[in-house]
Image (cartoon, helix red, strand yellow):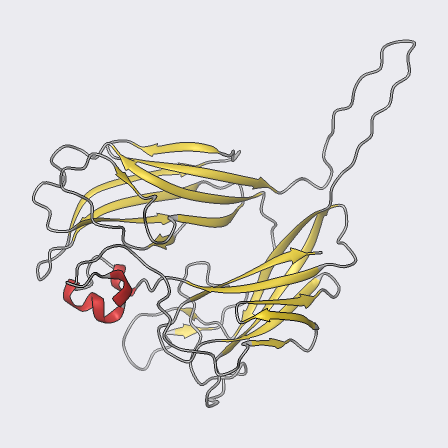
Amino acid sequence: MTLPTAILTVRIEKITGIPAGALTGAQHAYALATIAGRILGRSRPIPVDATDFDFGLEAIPWEHELAAFDAPILVTLEIWDDRGDDAPAKLATASGSLSAPYTSQAHLLGSSPAIACAVEVRLVPPSNPTVPVPRAASGTTSHATLRLTDSIVVELTEIKGLFCPVNEGGSGIVRAQVIAGYTSQDDRGRVYLNQALDGKWTKDTQLIKLHAKLTAVRGSLPADAQVRWTVGEADDPTNDDPGFHKQWGRYVDEKDYDVVGDHHGATGGDNEGTPDRSPPWEADPAFALVEIKNDQEATTAVVGGESGVILHCSNTAGDNFVVRAELVT
């Protein structure tokens, strides 16, 4: 796999310069945004007289961490009006790109309206960096001490048991299939209920086998390196689609709605099921399970620059989760 040049955290902070009258008469205006294709859930309602709107009060931070490969990173934001039984209406659009070389700073993308976002950058250093040292004056002696820190990239290279959607609707066609290297970068990956890793129907079994590769881009991999695995919930995006009927939303994702059924912003903690194994972590035969801290975290050994673990998923269709792998020493 090609290593990224940087790891970026992009946080959308506000939308500014909403054109006068753009929201006039709106019944329930809200924003939807994407960062490099990652969809962020519906925002809180936007007042009809707003010219700016702050996303700092959303229940879930409007941010996305991603690997960057020197290609432009597209950020888009749309303002929609939920009109109940009538078709939704798009009221305004803003978009812009973050281009290499990436820097940690505030950005204003687009205009009228514009997206104000903050970007934090962790550069992946080159394997042979050029380092300046002091120049000694003629007839004098001098020295410089250089200390290069180890820099390690952790990549999820395979998730066995994860299926990539390839077709929509209709019976008699393959809707999802295993694709080598697919790790649900588009947030659409599926894990099927009652199915073992070999694809066979197995009662009370839904699991994935995660594999990670550790690459020392500078220095070397520490001898005591391990991989920490964490799993968390993501908001159910089903009801965030502009065409999803308002009256049905609270039945699909109740926490996103207030007591009278109005959407008040995307909220996590939606999963209804529980894994059929507690704790949900199981050792991959190739990598020792060093520690299970709790249901959300486990640590595994590194062997030959690789590591892996088996995670048992919850037993209710529609649950969503995000898994993270990181180096610990």
Q: Is residue 274 above or below residue 90?
A: below
Q: Where is residue 24 in the image (x, y as percent from the top left)?
A: 9, 40
Q: Is residue 127 visible in the rendered structure shown here?
A: yes
Q: Position of residue 74 (x, y in %)?
A: 39, 43
Q: In this view of the protein, which residue sits in the foreground, 165 or 195? A: 195
Number of residue marks: 0
89 left or right of 292? left
Residue visible at 71% across and 42% down?
Answer: 127
> Where, quadrant-wise, is the N terminus in this rendering?
bottom right
35 left or right of 100? left
| Residue 50: quarter of image | top left
124 left or right of 180? right
Q: Where is residue 237 in the image (x, y as percent from the top left)?
A: 32, 62
Q: In this view, does 191 lie above or below 88?
A: below
303 left or right of 294? right
Q: Is residue 182 visible in the rendered structure shown here?
A: no
Q: Where is residue 66 in the image (x, y as percent from the top left)?
A: 49, 49
| Residue 245: quarter of image | bottom left
Residue visible at 42% across and 80% down?
Answer: 315
Q: In this view of the protein, which residue sits in the foreground, 69 or 173? A: 69
Residue visible at 58% across and 43% down?
Answer: 5
| Residue 107: quarter of image | top left
> Where, quadrant-wise, is the C terminus in this rendering?
bottom right
